[in-house]
Amino acid sequence: CEMSKNERKARWYFGGLASVGAAVVTHPLDLIKVTLQTQQGQLSVLQLIPKIVREQGVLAFYSGLSASMLRQMTYSTTRFGVYEVGKDYVNTDTFAGKVGLAGLSGLAGGIIGTPADMVNVRMQNDVKLPQEQRRNYKNAIDGLLKVYRQEGFPRLFSGATTATARGILMTIGQIAIYDQTKNILLDTPYFEDNLVTHFTASLVAGTIATTLTQPLDVLKTRSMNAKPGEYNGLWDIVKHTAKLGPLGFFKGYVPAFVRLGPHTILTFVFLEQLRLNFGSAPK
């Protein structure tokens, strides 16, 4: 039955499930990344971790976990779902087909995931603000309701342009590159449809996804954290970031990779296990 297992198809919601599982494992890394990107000081990762533990305890690393999970449930379920369903309508045998479908999936996921993403960024950023400036959302749902009540519905989609552009690049980097790399590996005599292949392909995908999305990620984090009126428009944030030199756009690349690498690997490893064990039989 081994062969028929390999031919199994992922169900549309497997990607969302796998991403939520991965998010629970990698959430502390995400928190460290947001802290690094928004601090104006020059603390390194090794200085930040003990500082957070000293000031807020170990559980601080899981602050905002509900928003992280809600974000994966909205954003990644959409991305993987559209991609999986879209395979029936788009020819994904070519690399261009994969990239096109992944881009479309990322567009949909980016838009649908923006509100949860914004609350996620704000909840993580709260950790660093002085007491009187904190937003103190109890959880993701509380955050969404408060933004809606206090700042209006459109504000839930603030940063949607960057979040969506990032969603497109991320999905191309992750899903299309993963699929393509996996196909290339399986075509060689050295790889089979197993953990080694899934790990290798997802490591490649994670690296490319980080490189594609890092500049947008920096802009997105800045725009979502901005006080009303701090920047007038996206271009203003670009100019502000450019003052740091071209590497300013890759600020926090290492922590971003340290987070996105394992997240991508875990997502695809979980996804493949779901597919091999619970996938639908090929038609």
Image (cartoon, rainbow, N blue to C red):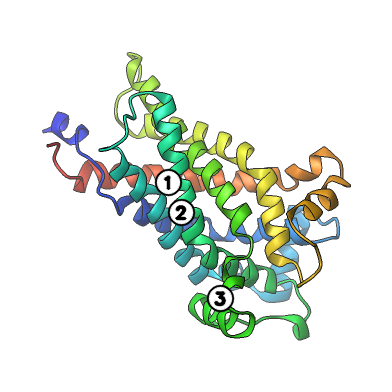
| Vertical side of 80 occupied by 152: above or below | below
Which disc, if any, is residue 105? Answer: 1
Characterize the local packing of mark 1: few (<14), some (14-19) or many (20 or more) Cα atoms within 10 angstroms: many
Residue at 84% x, 60% y: name it. 40
Q: Quadrant of residue 131?
A: bottom right
Disc 2 + disc 1, Cβ < 8 Å: yes
Q: Amino acid at mark 2?
A: Gly
Q: Quadrant of residue 249?
A: top right
Which disc, if any, is residue 153? Answer: 3
| Secondary structure beneath label 2 | helix
Q: Which residue is mark 2?
A: 109
Give the CA distance from mark 2 to mark 3. Answer: 19 Å
Characterize the local packing of mark 3: few (<14), some (14-19) or many (20 or more) Cα atoms within 10 angstroms: some
Label 1 or label 3, whichever comes before in sequence order: 1
Q: Amino acid at mark 3?
A: Phe
Disc 2 + disc 3, Cβ < 8 Å: no
